[in-house]
Image (tube, rainbow, N blue to C red):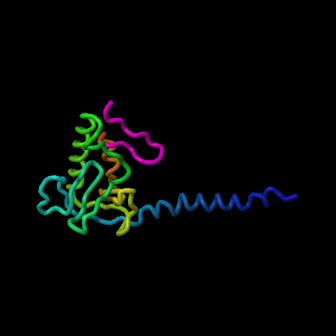
Amino acid sequence: MLSWWTLWRVPALLAIVSAAWWFLYRPYAEEQGWVRVTDTFALCGERWTGADGCVVDGDTLVVGNGSARRRVRLVGFDAPELNGACDAEREQAKRARSALHEWLSRGPFEWNGEADPPRDQYGRELRKVRRNIGKGRHEYLAEVMIERGLAGESGWGTTPVDWCR
């Protein structure tokens, strides 16, 4: 008969290696791939004089013009829709869009994904956004929008916000 150690050494070693990766390497890996963005943004539907892109709604941007034009879905939060189900959602969507424009207008920020970010089913780039606030600290756009009540959390296990209640 085999001892308990003989039977459990591979799963135990696998658990130790997995824990080491989770606590040591993963935080480092998540900090890679951030790109400084100095683009300026107008509100879509208004004149773009001097702007590099525009804010579509509370969580979507258009960057560039012509063949270089691309859509970017900012992730980590879900803003209400401009064509929402009720007046309350549409009004909140306008506030979220203005707040996003305001946040982006404060100056340079960073987004992840480098030159080849993941994309959603609509072909939009998916990017997290943050701003360096000094001393190695960052302000994440998703946290700002959620804390201000202008967006809900997004991702697995979250409940969508009912903006019409």
Which corner quadrant holds the N terminus? Answer: bottom right
Image quadrant where one finds the C terminus = top left
The residue under the point 73% across, 61% down is 9
Whether residue 110 is situated above or below residue 43 in the rendered picture:
below
Horizontal side of residue 22 vs 142, given as left or right: right
Query: Which SS type dominates the magenta stretch?
Result: loop
The residue positioned farthest toward the top in the image shown: 165
Inspect the magenta stretch and tell me whether residue 155 lies in it: yes
Residue 53 horizontal/vertical position (percent): 21, 60
Residue at x-position 29% and y-position 43%? 81
On whether residue 59 falls in the magenta region, the answer is: no
Specify the segment rendered in magenta: 151-165
Is residue 99 shown left or right of residue 160? left
For residue 151, which quarter of the picture?
top left
Q: Which image quadrant is residue 133 in? A: bottom left
The image shows residue 116 at horizontal and vertical percentages of 37, 68
Q: Give the residue at x 31% y 39%.
A: 149
Q: Nearer the viewer, residue 75 or 84?
A: 84
Instruction: Name the outermost residue toward the right.
Output: 1
Choose between 120 and 38: the one closer to the eye: 120
Q: How many marks?
A: 0
Position of residue 16 measured from the top left corner of the image (x, y, whole percent)? 64, 59
Q: In this rendered view, identify the residue nearer to me: 127 or 129.
A: 127
In the foreground, 24 or 75: 75
Residue 164, horizontal then vertical, whole percent: 31, 33
Hey, which quadrant is residue 79 in on the image?
A: top left
